[in-house]
Amino acid sequence: MAKKLSTLFFSTLKKVARQQRKAMKLARPVARSTTSRGSPSKPRKAAATVATRGLAPAITPLTTDELPPPGKGSWQTFVHKPQTGVLWGGLTFFLYRPPGLPLAGRPLVIMLHGCRQTAHEFALGSRMNRLADSKGFVVAYPQQSKRIQSMQCWRWFQPQRAQGLAEADAIADLARTLVSKYRLDASRVYVAGLSAGAGMAALTVLRHPEQFAAAALHSGVVVGAAHSPTAGLRIMRKGADGDLRALVKPFVGGSAAGVPSGADKSDSQDVGQFPGMPVMILHGQRDRIVSSRNAVQLAEQFSYVNGTSAMKESMLGRGTHREYARQDFLKGGRIMVRLGLIKEVGHAWSGGDAKLKFHSAKGPSASVLMWAFFAMHRRA
């Protein structure tokens, strides 16, 4: 099992430097803008159409030969140059817009894929675009680059300012830019992630709570226990030891986020000043890659930063392949943390397309559960 885990995330770690040097010499591939309604459009015409929609210079259209995931709306590829922070090479992302106008006032959901997975595969497997069609929200799928991490992992396990935190800052900046340029509803911006994407989603909302109304973490890892790939692998297997509150506190609000273990944390923001962050945590009880102990520990950490004072337990879908145990942590009657432990799911997106790796047909639809949770929360 240890060998399998190492293969999944870090077996090529020694080759990363060489691959990055080679990647820097590669030219960016030529691509086409696509829509979910038909075949790829002509490159020049597509780029001109995008330009007339008022996108900021920080967002540049790209093209791809991949067929768009199912959906009635439009699917396009861009690269985002963050206005703040440092991220080498920019942030490539796919944007899905449901059919019908106007876009103004619609919610935004940011979706972060896992390791050894692409944003395109994540859109296919999660079926989030189809849900966006029926519920009327916009979806953005940032893509981690192999030039940055050879296994395409978001670097939650390296939460330093030039690494994992740079990615968190870029994701928050992307959300802010999309809200501004499409006049989306700034009070309804959400982020969800699977595995490494869940780890990055947690860092992003803790560092930029003012940008997001809620988050959803599927098969994620406890915050703050890892500061290297080796430590990340250990935490995935066993969860964290020690004071979970002390681990998460340096990341709250971004004031001292990402300080290495043992460094001066005196300038970290008091969690009493944290504006709150509703979080849904989902985890398969048959997960052999990331221990479900991480989910329980994440619930404790976010209960702490949210100041929850009560808890309710329930069992849903009893006796079916959708069975899961749910715990709600409340503050003033409001659900701030929701933990779902799913009986028959492993390290996979619950209720997804099982034809794709890291997606399971078993369990309730994670996409539906997440949107129901998101719909309960707005950022004032």
Image (cartoon, rainbow, N blue to C red):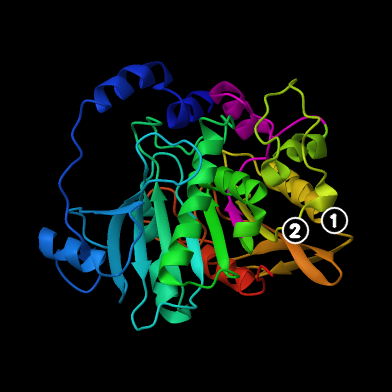
The three-letter amino acid code for the residue at tag 2 is Gly
Mark 2 residue crowding within 10 angstroms, few (<14) / some (14–19) / many (20+):
many
- Coordinates of residue 33 in the picture (x, y in percent): 20, 60
Q: Are marks 1 and 2 in contact (CB under 8 Å)?
A: yes
State the residue at coordinates (20%, 54%): 63
Q: Quadrant of residue 372?
A: bottom right
First of labels 1, 2 by sequence position? 2
Q: Which residues fall within the magenta stretch?
A: 215-242
- Coordinates of residue 368 in the picture (x, y in percent): 53, 70
User: Is residue 219 rendered magenta in the image?
Assistant: yes
Drawn side of residue 129 relative to residue 110, left or right: left
Mark seen at residue 276: 2
- Coordinates of residue 276 in the picture (x, y in percent): 75, 58
Nearer mark to the viewer, of 1 and 2:
2
Mark 1 residue crowding within 10 angstroms, few (<14) / some (14–19) / many (20+):
some
Q: Nearer the viewer, residue 275 or 36?
A: 275
Drawn side of residue 29 relative to residue 276, left or right: left
User: Is residue 238 rendered magenta in the image?
Assistant: yes
Q: Is residue 292 above or below residue 63?
A: above
Q: Which residue is mark 1?
A: 307
Asked if residue 252 can be seen in this view, the reply is yes
Q: Is residue 28 above or below residue 133?
A: above
Which residue lies most toward the right here? 309
Asked if residue 360 can be seen in this view, the reply is no
- Coordinates of residue 295 in the picture (x, y in percent): 68, 47
Tell me the distance, in whole angstroms, between the alpha carbons under discs 1 and 2: 8 Å
